Image (spheres, rainbow, N blue to C red):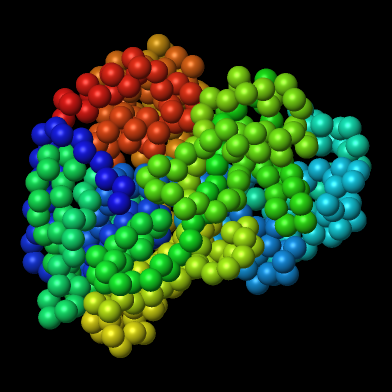
Amino acid sequence: MRTSTVTRPISPAREHTRAELTRGTFDLLVIGGGILGTSVAWMATQAGLRVAMVDAGDFAGATSSASSKLVHGGLRYLQTGNVGLVAENHRERRALSGSVAPHLVNPMPFLVPVYKGGPHGAAKMGAGVFLYSALSAFGDGVGRVMTPAHARRLVPDLRTDGLKAVAAYHDHQMNDSRVAVMTVRAAVEAGAVVLNHAPVQGLRTTHGRVSGAEVRDGVDGTEFGIDARLVLNATGPWIDHLRRMEDPAAEPSIRLSKGAHLVVKPNRPWHAALTVPVDKYRVSFAIPWEDHLLLGTTDEEFTGDPAEVAPDGADVDQILGEAGTAVGADVLDPANITYSFAGLRVLPGGPGGTSAAKRETVVTRGRGGMLSVAGGKWTTYRHIGRTVIDRLRRSRSVPLAEDMSPTLKTVPLPGIARPEAVAHRLTADAEPPRRMDPLVARHLATHYGSVALDIADLVREDPSLGERIHPEGPDIWAQAVFARDSEWAQTADDVLRRRTTVTVRGLDTDDVRARVEALLAER
C-alpha cells in the first residue's frame, strides 16, 4: 500500500490522537482517508457512532486530490441516456454550491465548441445543453447556443477555424484538496478521531471476525493497535490489497483507470471553460483554475503499482492533442506546462474498455466481516457516504444498526460564508501598510471561507507570516503554519500541494521546499 515515512518527533496533538485511537473500542474504523472514507467517517459520526479513520499517506493524498476539480452533473452522461444520474448529480452539485460549501465550490460557465466534421452537430448540442439545464431546474440559467464571436470573448484562445457554433451551460469547480481537508475537519468537529501517515500493517481478528487493525505511525515508527466493532476498507486503488489481508484467497474486485491532467499557464485570462468532444462519448476539458488552465483527462486501463501512477509522455501528447482541437497552439506549447498529475479511477471489475465502465459505488463484505467500498465521484461524495451509512443501518450482519441515529440532510462544511464578505473583512481589518493584499484576501476567502480569519490572526501575531511563500503566487506563510498546526500536515507535499496551491502553480522551488521543511521541523 501507499505509505510514507517522515521520521521526526511527533507533536503533542498527534501523540494525543494516537493515544485516543488506542482507547477502548470504536464502533467503526475507516481505513483510507480519501474523500470516500472521509465522507463515511463524517456521516457515521453524525449518526452517533464513535469513529476512527487512518490513512497510509496524507488525507486525499492520492486519487482524491487528482481529479478534474469539477462538481458537475455530467453532460456526457446524457449521451448514454443516463438522465437519472445527471439529475442526481445536479441535486448534489446545487447542494454543495448553495448550502454545504459555497465558500469552496464556485460557478463556472462551460462552452462546447461544435466544429465542422466533429462528432456532434450544433442542433444536437443545443438540445443537449437545454436538457442539461432543465435537469437542474434551470437553477443556473438556460443552456443555449451562442455565436463563435461571443464565445471568443469568454475564451480568447478558442480556435475558430471550422467552428460552426458553441453550446453553453453552467457547472461548478473546486479545489479538491481544500474540500477534502475541510471535510476531514468536519468529521473531527463531529467527533471522529483521525490520523494520516499511519499505514495499516495487518488486521486484528476475534473469533474469525475482523475487529481492528495494527497500525504504524509513519512519522516516528511507533506501532499500535486500534479495536473496532466494524472495519471499513475505503483504500481506493489499494482496496484488494487490504481485502487479501482479510482473506488471502480474495479474488480481484476492481480495475483501475488512469486519469492524467496538465496545468498550463495561459497568456491571458479565460472567463469560461471548454468541454471539447473527442468522440461520440468522451470529452476533454480546458478549465480556468488557480490562475492557470487545467487540461485533461485521459481514461486508460492501469495495471501497475498505484503508488507509481504518474503522467507519461503519451499522456502529455494525448492531452495536448485533444485540447488542440479547440485551443490555440501558443497556449499548448509544452514549455507552458507548470505541473502535471495523475490519479486512478476505481471501477467495478468486468470486461470492456474503462471509458465505458459504470462510475458506480460498490460495497462488498468479506469473509471476516470487513466491508469494502469503492468507486463513486466527487460530486456525489456526500450521497455516497449516506448510502454506505444506510447500508450499515439495514444490514443485520453489521453490529451497529441499533446504535445509529438519522443523519441531518444538510450539514455545511466548516468556514461556510460568502467569499466576497470574507475577503472584504480581511482587507478592512487593518490600516495600511498592514492591510492585506486584496488578491491574497480573495485567495484565502475562496479556499478557507471564514476559517481564513484564523489565518489572519496568525499574521497579526507575526506580520512576517503575511509574506507570500513565492512572490508569483497568492499563498502566504501563515497558511503553512496553519496547515502544520491545524490541518494535519506532516510533509512538504502536504503543505505545498494539498493545503496550498504552491505546487500546482509550478512555484515549488528548492528554496520554498527547504523553508517548509524547516517550518515543519519547528513543531
Left of 195 or right of it: where is 501? right
Q: What is the residue that sits farthest to the front in this orientation? A: 249
The image shows residue 522 at horizontal and vertical percentages of 16, 25
- Residue 211 placement: quadrant: bottom left
Classify residue 499 as left or right of residue 318.
left
In-front residue for pair 291/160 = 160
Image point 45% across, 21% down: which residue?
507
Where's residue 132, x and y in %? 73, 60
In front: 333, or 495?
Answer: 333
Q: Is 195 on the left or on the right of 129, as rendered?
A: left
Residue 251 in view of the camera: yes
Up-down: is 359 above or below 182? below
Residue at 43 percent of width and 28 percent of height:
503
Q: Nearer the viewer, residue 406 or 392?
A: 392
Between 292 and 474, the one lying in front of the other is 292
Quadrant of the image containing the C terminus: top left
User: In the image, residue 356 lies at what x, y percent?
Assistant: 64, 62
Farthest bottom residue in view: 396
Residue 77's image quarter?
bottom right
Q: Residue at x 12, y 39 (%)?
A: 220
Q: Residue at x 10, y 51 (%)?
A: 223
